[in-house]
Image (spheres, rainbow, N blue to C red):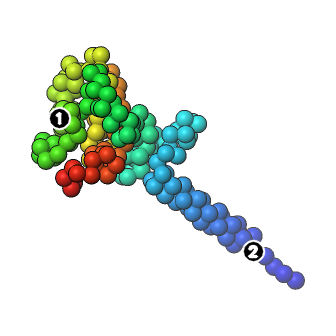
Amino acid sequence: MLKINISNLKLKIALQVLIWLIIIFGSLLSAMIYNSDILKPLMESGIPLNHLSGLPILGDKIRAASIPQITVQELQKLILSKNPQLLLIDVRTPAEYEYTHIPGAILVPLTDVEAGIGIINIKSLTPGHKLITYCSVGVRSNKALELLKSAGITGENVKGGIHEWRNKIDPSMPEL
């Protein structure tokens, strides 16, 4: 007669379920990190991802999904149209800005925004303007827009930052 130990069977099934959940969660996590475009629809559908925004790497992607983004091609069209309402803010360091920046950009370092003085400066410039921020790849400028949003200032972030600008718009720009 075959004797089955039920407690060992339950443990084995529980471990298999746990392993599958880890695999599924890991796959979803990888997909979100490497294709952050899937985050916005997930968040809009009601999946509560905001509580993960403090995590390294993934948190940056989640925060970016809640900030309006503009492509470098769209930014280039705005710049070429000489739109007087365009307010382009570079939130990198003064040394980075001095080395190279997107034409027409005004420097307001993220450290100034975090200290509050940058928020005051941008607030004085924004009435009647379309605010667009950028940094190297988009992490600092997304953070700046979060801080500005809490002060009642809305804007868009350049997706991929100045690296994307150099790669797709101006390859003659100095190597970053």
- Find numbered disc 2 in the image and state the secondary structure of the residue it sits on: loop
Is residue 67 positioned above or below 122 on the image? below
* Residue at image point 16% right, 42% down: 97
Characterize the local packing of mark 2: few (<14), some (14-19) or many (20 or more) Cα atoms within 10 angstroms. Answer: few
The answer to whether residue 18 is visible is no
- Count of numbered tags: 2
Q: Which quarter of the rendering shows the C terminus?
A: bottom left
At 62% from the left edge and 63% from the top edge, which residue is drawn? 20
Task: Note whether residue 129 is visible.
Answer: yes
Q: Residue furthest top?
A: 128
> Which class describes the residues within 10 Å of circle 1: few (<14), some (14-19), or many (20+)?
some
Residue 5: give its label: 2
Residue 92 pos. (x, y %): 20, 42
In the picture, measured across the screen, residue 157 lies left or right of residue 8, that is left
- Quarter of the image where one finds residue 74: top left
Mark 2 vs mark 1: which is more N-terminal?
Answer: 2
Position in image of residue 152 (x %, y %)? 33, 21
Image position, residue 27 (x, y; %): 54, 59
Q: Decide which of 35, 71 is in the foreground and name it.
A: 71
**In the drawing, does residue 8 fall left or right of residue 69?**
right
Query: Type of residue at label 2?
Result: Asn
- Above or below residue 133? Residue 161 is below
Q: Which mark is residue 107?
A: 1
* Residue 121 pos. (x, y %): 18, 24
Judged from this view, the residue extending furthest toward the right is 1
